[in-house]
Amino acid sequence: MRRDINWTTKRDDGSRYDVRVTWFSGTFKLQFKERGADRWEYDRKPTREDWETFLDSIERRYQRKTATLKELEEARRMAAAGMPADGEDQPPA
């Protein structure tokens, strides 16, 4: 993948956090940063919405030939393993 994938998520309470996904060493690294925070978090579990946004983005990149089949397959594998079941989203951090 040539570029990072970035987006901002807005919670129901109006707070926001940024998500950055990088391709490194054959896998994706998801990073999170609360608005106003100085550092990125590397150990937070993504919500269902985060996984869905990530998958949508990587699938669109694959269609435009800016992501490889290997990257798409890894993204789908990671999402299937990490996506919480309906109603099991983690509370906001």
Image (tube, rainbow, N blue to C red):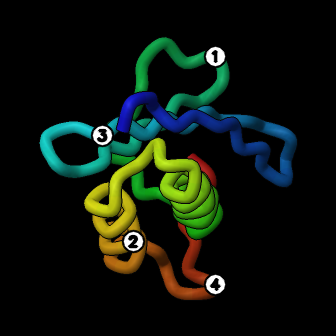
Type of amino acid under label 2? Arg
**Which residue in the structure is indicated by mark 3?**
23
Tag shown at residue 76: 2
Query: SS at mark 2?
Result: helix
- 8 up-or-down from 55: above or below: above
Q: Which residue is mark 4?
A: 87
| Residue at 64% from the left image edge and 63% from the top image edge | 49
Please report whichever mark, 1 or 4, sits nearer to the chain's N-terminal start. Answer: 1
Residue 36: assigned label: 1
In 3D space, how far apart are the residues under numbered discs 1 and 4 (Cα atoms)? 28 Å
Is residue 49 rendered to the left or right of residue 16?
left
Place of residue 89 in the rendered image (x, y in percent of width and height, measured from the top left): 58, 71
Task: State the CA–CA distance, disc 3 to disc 2.
Answer: 14 Å
Q: Residue at x 45, y 31 (%)?
A: 4
Q: Earlier in the sequence, mark 3 or mark 2?
A: 3
Tell me the SS state at disc 4: loop
Q: Earlier in the sequence, mark 1 or mark 3?
A: 3
- In the image, what residue occupies the spot 39% across and 79% down? 80
Q: Earlier in the sequence, mark 2 or mark 4?
A: 2
Query: Which residue is the extreme one toward the front?
Result: 65
Local crowd size for mark 4, using a 10 Å CA cut-off: few (<14), some (14–19), many (≥20): few
How far apart marks 1 and 3 lie (CA) works out to 25 Å
Looking at the image, do the residues carrying marks 1 and 4 touch, with CB atoms under 8 Å apart? no
